[in-house]
Image (cartoon, rainbow, N blue to C red):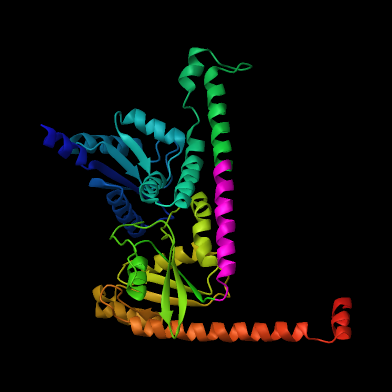
């Protein structure tokens, strides 16, 4: 009996996915996004038993999808013994409640809620845990509305009165806002400490690794540095930035891996994780890793660029790498060569293209030294300039 209980606890939650295709989101893109949602659900520990994709002109304000589709999903949940439904688009608090009323006993989640669940499971350091808590609280805030309406009705709260439910709701919101402020202050201290560390490492060449989730950034870091960074074929397998040293051309340089990106990532989530991306913001060179085998690699590139906008200077040199070359067919390799001639095709798993990548690092390292020497020379000349010349410069 004991073994059966353990087996039951280990059983995966069965879930159904729901995606929507609108005039702005073409069916092929909606299908790819739904497939990615499936991978997110698997990463969270769920078993996907069915997927629905509905084409609509406009979202339903009450339930996001039409009433007929809600009934279709309800029937599938019963038939397949699934207890969770995950929507690929964000749900408002009222939509969640309406769906829960129509699907009694079923857990209703959206993409953001699922991503936050994954983040919470994968957060290891104090910093990432703080960031996840901030994101969870910000996600929860707009979904509190109406949570206490049953109490308001009991006490006839109406115009000119305040039922205890409304008071409780305001108390909850105030507590959440206060908690968010406290957490943000702690994150600011961590960010200040990171800035100090970055200043102390000014004399070491620093490469920041960025890219879409599951592009193979951690595997590439391991291959280059011989480190043992956690690697798993799952979305968001690693959340925390990891920094490793690489001995190159007679000196040590630093490689910093960052959290992966994903499409439809809410703005407040990007804002929350900016401190992790701050590692890349201080880098002297950016290594952009792309899964060259992904059917939608172009969109991965676009998501990465949009996420990094305003975080990383456009003047920072970039190296683009298409990873997973070992599973790309000849047509894809040719396509990448023709469209991105400056990029390097590698396989971190099979150790392909690593020498060429190291040579590119050496070129960037040499350029960085030249730039530093030129800056130091300029500073030296300025400090040794005659007094009158300096005074004239100040007057000007």
The quadrant of the picture occupied by the N terminus is top left
Q: Is residue 12 above or below residue 396?
A: above
Q: Compared to 91, does 151 lie above or below?
A: above
Q: Position of residue 330 (x, y in %)?
A: 25, 80
Q: What residue is drawn where x is 55% and y is 50%?
A: 187
Residue 18 seen in the current view: yes
Residue that sits furthest to the left in the current view:
1
Say left or right for 376 vs 310: right
| Whole-percent x, y for residue 56 in the image | 38, 47
Q: Is residue 225 magenta?
A: no
Asked where in the image residue 291 lies, by quadrant, the reply is: bottom left
Question: Is residue 310 something that shows in the picture?
Answer: no
Q: Start and end of the magenta stretch?
A: 182-203
Looking at the rendering, in which quadrant would you find the C terminus?
bottom right
Question: At x 55% / y 17%, what residue is drawn?
Answer: 163
Residue 294 versus residue 290: which sits nearer the camera? 290
Left or right of 376 on screen, residue 369: left
User: Depth check: 396 or 169 in front?
Assistant: 396
């Amino acid at each position: 009996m004991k073994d059966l209980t353990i087996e039951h606890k280990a059983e995966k939650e069965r879930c159904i996915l729901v995606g929507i295709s609108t005039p702005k989101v073409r069916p092929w893109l909606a299908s790819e996004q739904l497939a990615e949602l499936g991978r997110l659900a698997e990463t969270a520990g769920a078993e996907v038993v069915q997927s629905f994709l509905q084409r609509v002109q406009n979202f339903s304000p009450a339930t996001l999808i039409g009433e007929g589709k809600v009934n279709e999903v309800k029937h599938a949940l019963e038939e397949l013994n699934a207890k969770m439904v995950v929507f690929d688009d964000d749900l408002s608090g009222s939509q969640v409640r309406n769906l829960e009323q129509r699907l009694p006993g079923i857990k209703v989640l959206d993409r953001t809620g699922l991503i936050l669940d994954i983040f919470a499971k994968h957060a290891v350091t104090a910093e990432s845990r703080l960031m996840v808590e901030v994101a969870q609280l910000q996600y929860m805030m707009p979904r509190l509305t109406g949570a206490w309406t049953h109490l308001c009705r009991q006490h006839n709260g109406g115009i000119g009165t305040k039922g205890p439910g409304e008071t409780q709701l305001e108390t909850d919101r105030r507590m959440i806002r206060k908690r968010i402020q406290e957490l943000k202050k702690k994150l600011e201290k961590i960010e200040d400490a990171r800035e100090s560390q970055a200043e102390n490492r000014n004399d070491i060449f620093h490469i920041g690794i960025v890219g879409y989730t599951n592009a193979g950034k951690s595997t590439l870091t391991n291959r280059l540095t011989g480190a043992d960074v956690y690697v798993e074929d799952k979305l968001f397998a690693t959340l925390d930035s990891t920094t490793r040293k690489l001995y190159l051309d007679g000196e040590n340089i630093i490689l910093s891996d960052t959290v992966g990106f994903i499409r439809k990532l809410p703005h407040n989530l990007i804002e929350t994780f900016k401190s992790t991306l701050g590692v890349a913001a201080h880098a002297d060179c950016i290594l952009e890793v792309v899964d060259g085998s992904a059917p939608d690699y172009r969109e991965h590139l676009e998501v990465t660029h949009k996420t990094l906008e305003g975080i990383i200077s456009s003047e920072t040199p970039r190296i683009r790498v298409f990873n997973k070359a070992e599973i790309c067919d000849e047509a894809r390799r040719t396509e990448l060569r023709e469209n991105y001639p400056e990029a390097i095709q590698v396989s971190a798993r099979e150790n392909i293209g690593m020498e060429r990548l190291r040579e590119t690092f050496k070129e960037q390292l040499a350029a960085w030294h030249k730039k530093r020497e030129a800056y130091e020379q300029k500073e030296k000349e300025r400090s040794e300039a005659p007094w009158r010349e300096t005074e004239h410069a100040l007057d000007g």
